Amino acid sequence: MKVNKAEIVISAVSEKQYPNDALPEIVLLGRSNVGKSSLINTLINRQHLARTSSKPGKTQTMNFYQINDIFRFVDMPGYGYAKVSRKEQQKWGQMIENYLLNRENLKGVFLLIDSRHDPTEDDELMYNWLKYYHLPTHVILTKFDKLSASKKKKSVRQLLEILNVEADTVIPFSSVSKEGSETCWQIIQSKIAD
Ligand code: GTP
Ligand code: MG
């Protein structure tokens, strides 16, 4: 998709603030620092639309990015960031869960997992939860540029084993080399056309 227009429509902290229309949405989930905001910037080819940071915990609100006025990315705060208080984490957990279960606009979920490490317990919980509720999920293995060729194979294999993910729903991705961008776009286009 050629992106001519990309803008943030709202940084929401409560459901009342969600855009009130029928545009399809693709949501990005994953641990803090895994590369959610970077993935959005890479796909739309703008370096700084979604704020990124080398320090985890950058995204603290639900950010709705509208693309070409035909769909939105919803960038979520990351989970598993110890410096955010437990209370705050619970609040976010509730909001994200509520969004995932009730938002009619939601057409697809990208769950991002760091390719350099085994999936964490949080990743596993998240993936199993999404599967349990039959949410249309793809797993994006991020920071793939950081792996050697042999580690690339191992990373995919371990993900398939540990999470029991179907192979055709795993996408190796890098916001540096842009590997995986085409596949992400194909998925987005098929989801938003449904
Ligand atoms: P939170 O907002 O804290 O939840 O993090 P996030 O998941 O949005 O991560 P973000 O996109 O801010 O990226 C975190 C860090 O990882 C930044 O320093 C990025 O430059 C870096 N990063 C993200 N994707 C990649 C990638 O594919 N390759 C490499 N080498 N670095 C990446
Ligand atoms: Mg972010």
Image (cartoon, grey):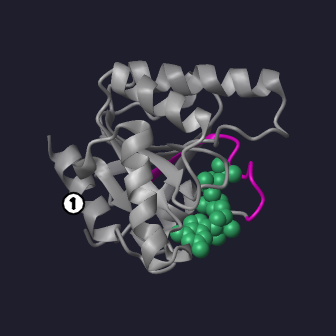
Quadrant for residue 96, please give it. Answer: top right
Q: Is residue 116 magenta?
A: no
Seen from the viewer's position, the closer of residues 20 and 42 is 42
Seen from the viewer's position, the closer of residues 16 and 141 is 141
Q: Residue at x 52, y 22 (%)?
A: 97
Q: Is residue 57 magenta?
A: yes
Type of the residue with mark 1: Gln
Residue 28 at what x, y percent from top left? Answer: 47, 46
Horizontally, residue 166 falls left or right of residue 40, namely: left
Label 1, secondary structure: give it: helix
Q: Residues within 10 Å of mark 1 (few under 14, many from 20)?
A: few
Q: Residue at x 73, y 52 (%)?
A: 58
Seen from the viewer's position, the closer of residues 44 and 56 is 56
Magenta part of the protein: which range?
Answer: 54-67
Residue 84 at what x, y percent from top left? Answer: 81, 36
Say whether residue 179 is visible: yes
Q: Residue at x 41, y 19 (%)?
A: 101
Relative to 75, say whether 91 is above or below.
above
Which residue is tagged 1? 186
